[in-house]
Image (cartoon, coloured by chain):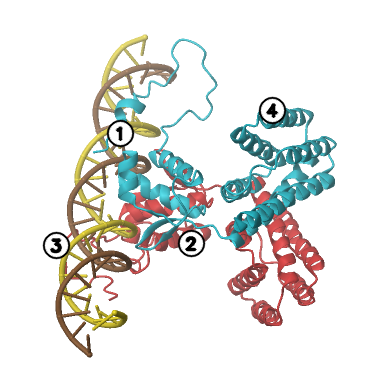
Chain colours: A red, B cyan, C brown, D yellow
Amino acid sequence: MTDQEGSSPPAAGGGRRSAIPRGGARAARQPLERPAPLRQAVYDVIAEMIISRELRPGEHLVENELAAQLGVSRQPVREALQRLQSEGWVDLRPALGAFVHVPTEEEADQLLATRSLLETESARLAAKQATPEQVSRLWELQSAGEKALSDDDQDGLVAANAALHAYVVSMSGNKVLAELIALVDRRVRWYYAPIAKSRGREAWDEHAALIEVIASRNGRRAADLMRRHTERTRDSYHKRRMEASGS
Amino acid sequence: MTDQEGSSPPAAGGGRRSAIPRGGARAARQPLERPAPLRQAVYDVIAEMIISRELRPGEHLVENELAAQLGVSRQPVREALQRLQSEGWVDLRPALGAFVHVPTEEEADQLLATRSLLETESARLAAKQATPEQVSRLWELQSAGEKALSDDDQDGLVAANAALHAYVVSMSGNKVLAELIALVDRRVRWYYAPIAKSRGREAWDEHAALIEVIASRNGRRAADLMRRHTERTRDSYHKRRMEASGS
DNA sequence: ATGTGGGCGACTGTATGCTAAAAACCGGTC
DNA sequence: GACCGGTTTTTAGCATACAGTCGCCCACAT
């Protein structure tokens, strides 16, 4: 199996992997792995490119170019773009194509507000049914975060933060809620990242407090802490933004 | 075959872009109507078929069949199916195709719980910034609902209910929240409809009370009422389900 | 110079062809 | 009689081909 790239003999039929990206402004990506649905891989790559700002807001995404860069046909690209639209990453204007979504300040605030609401509920639910095993897992994640903090590892910090929140969400047991949070969170990170470094020490102190409350199974207080935690992030966003707009 | 209705799009729908209203009222058409992509129409039709139970949970949706039935090619069908997946209507198993999602009891409860959370927040926000015009619009929707109620018009009742809730959501001003609610609500209706008739009089009395509180701009009480309202719906769901499982 | 109209290029939307893989079928074997 | 291996059928996945639209540019008229 895994007869991925290049080595497949059947040159006759269709023959698809002749897609050599033309040397261009954008770095060429090597063809993707085969086994899993291609559209998924394409989706991942494009989402990553958007999040990393390699594709900038407002930019017109041409199906052909993307297809060539990724070494696939337009079809998987189209499918990926449509999914990206449904999740708010791009705007798909009929007959015109896909444009990277342009985040507005208003939208960012609404996202942060919604995230706060959802995460608060998930913390409440998580606390109500936390098991000791889960709590100790939380502490593990917490210490991973603190390590990244002391190492001054920005990427690691973001990842650890996401992992911790994600685990709390999963503890809530509400899959629908979890799905929505996943959607919102990812976009929050996109909006938030460029203007603000992680809140750092402060945020992780709050995490520690939250875990303790969860361990005590106190849903109300867990919700309270999570609300304050996410609202502070929201405030932090606004503060940073104002600073940034001044520059 | 099965060339039902105009399978040739350019003939009927298109008609050149002489969409400019000749000689007369230049209607303020804002975003200038665009040729609706076929995938959208296909999406609507399939979603409708799922909601109406014409396609039953678990059923295997074959691209070819749907395409033939609708008189289009597989492509728009594929695109529609993928969007349906992202919104939870079908499960797309790699290399196997699309299956109408099978609702579980657990999921239904989680949906109802999430809906309650979201709608509660939207009511709170709506109340905080309600204008007199908006309130009177709410009363209009309310009386439409009561009319349907006295006419014993089930479909109308469901529609009126949706319209009222949707308007409250729009009043919240939070578009992100609104989007999530739209997603959740539709699925709730799907799960809920088959086992329970609308709660009727009771629900509309609660609506009336809610509108009054919104008119008074009391966010806290609005949230309270909405929470109770949606939680009652949730209870009603469980009650009906237990009755149904007995039969 | 400025406004208008037609032609041209580019890109999306839709249709169809081809391939590979999973499932159903069937016959053989223990 | 049940299980196993190969074969056929079905169907999704991907690629490619085709057609309709949109926007731009430029020539031309005012």
- How many marks can you see? 4
Q: Nearer the viewer, residue B216 or B159?
A: B159
Residue type, mark 2 in image: Glu
Same chain assignment for discs 4 and 3:
no
Residue type, mark 1 in image: Gln
Q: CA distance from mark 2 to mark 3?
A: 34 Å
| Camera-side mark, 1 or 4 | 4
Secondary element at image label 4: helix
Q: CA distance from mark 1 to mark 3?
A: 38 Å
| Camera-side mark, 1 or 3 | 1
Circles 1 and 4: CB atoms closer than 8 Å: no
Q: Quadrant of the N terminus of chain B?
A: top left
Q: Nearer the viewer, residue B182 or B35?
A: B182
Image disc number at residue B4 = 1
State the residue position of label 3: A12
Q: Position of residue C10 (x, y in %)?
A: 32, 42
**Dot 1: within a 10 Å radius of its alpha carbon, few (fewer than 14), some, or many (20 or more) residues?**
few
State the residue position of label 2: A48
**Dot 4: within a 10 Å radius of its alpha carbon, few (fewer than 14), some, or many (20 or more) residues?**
some
Q: Position of residue A148 (x, y in %)?
A: 64, 78
**Dot 2: within a 10 Å radius of its alpha carbon, few (fewer than 14), some, or many (20 or more) residues?**
few
